[in-house]
Amino acid sequence: MKDLSMHIMDLVENAIRAGADTVQVEVVSDPNRKEMYITVKDNGKGVRPEELPLLLDPFYTTKEGKKVGLGIPLFNETCKRCGGELVIKPNGMKGLWVQGRLLTDNIDLPPLGDLASAISGLMLLYPHVSISLLLAMGKEVLTVSTKDLTKVEDSWDAKSLLDLKAKIKEFLKRTLREVG
């Protein structure tokens, strides 16, 4: 995948396919330690402990009719290529906790990409799912969620969704310039 926002989209969509109605995304960059953590937590059906190692196998998938599941293995490879690691574990009694650690000074680190469009697009596609995003870039923190949006029938009000997208874009533009 060409950027980190695509990995995040894939992880969120995996969670939703696994029955999650709540998905939390955290992107935390520590400029002092030159690390970035991307965490996705959900309350989907989760996996049994013995299945956890299988999630890293590109030829293992839980999707009906599919023969491969490349999302998590690709994110794992991106983390390793950037001097980091991927950790997957159960999220309490239900769901999954996936965290990638990447070194931000690594030459192979992909760009963050259009995270604002990725998150707002997921919120638009899945109005029945509570999606939240925590962005921490150095000392600056932004949190947004579907709770910030105005509901119109079974979807979101377009203006509130565009405002949320603009808020994320502005935050990233300002903080990424400050962080590095």
Image (spheres, rainbow, N blue to C red):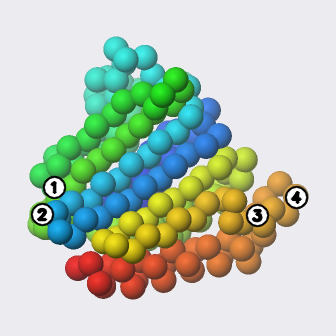
As drawn, 164 above or below 59: below
Q: CA distance from mark 2 to mark 4?
A: 46 Å
Q: CA distance from mark 3 to mark 1?
A: 37 Å
- Looking at marks 2 and 1 on the same chain, the residue that comes earlier in the sequence is marked by 1
In the displayed structure, does residue 142 sit left or right of residue 74?
right
Q: CA distance from mark 2 to mark 1?
A: 6 Å
The kind of residue on which mark 3 rests is Trp
Q: How many marks?
A: 4
Point out residue 166 in the picture as x, y percentages from the top left corner: 57, 80
- Looking at marks 4 and 1 on the same chain, the residue that comes earlier in the sequence is marked by 1
- Answer few, some or many: residues within 10 Å of disc 1's Cα (few below 14, many 20 plus, some between 14 and 19): many
- Looking at marks 3 and 1 on the same chain, the residue that comes earlier in the sequence is marked by 1
- Answer few, some or many: residues within 10 Å of disc 4's Cα (few below 14, many 20 plus, some between 14 and 19): few
Q: Are marks 4 and 1 in contact (CB under 8 Å)?
A: no
Give the residue at mark 3: 156
Q: Is residue 38 visible?
A: yes
The kind of residue on which mark 2 rests is Asn
- Answer few, some or many: residues within 10 Å of disc 3's Cα (few below 14, many 20 plus, some between 14 and 19): some
Residue nearer the viewer, 61 or 15: 15
Give the residue at mark 1: 82
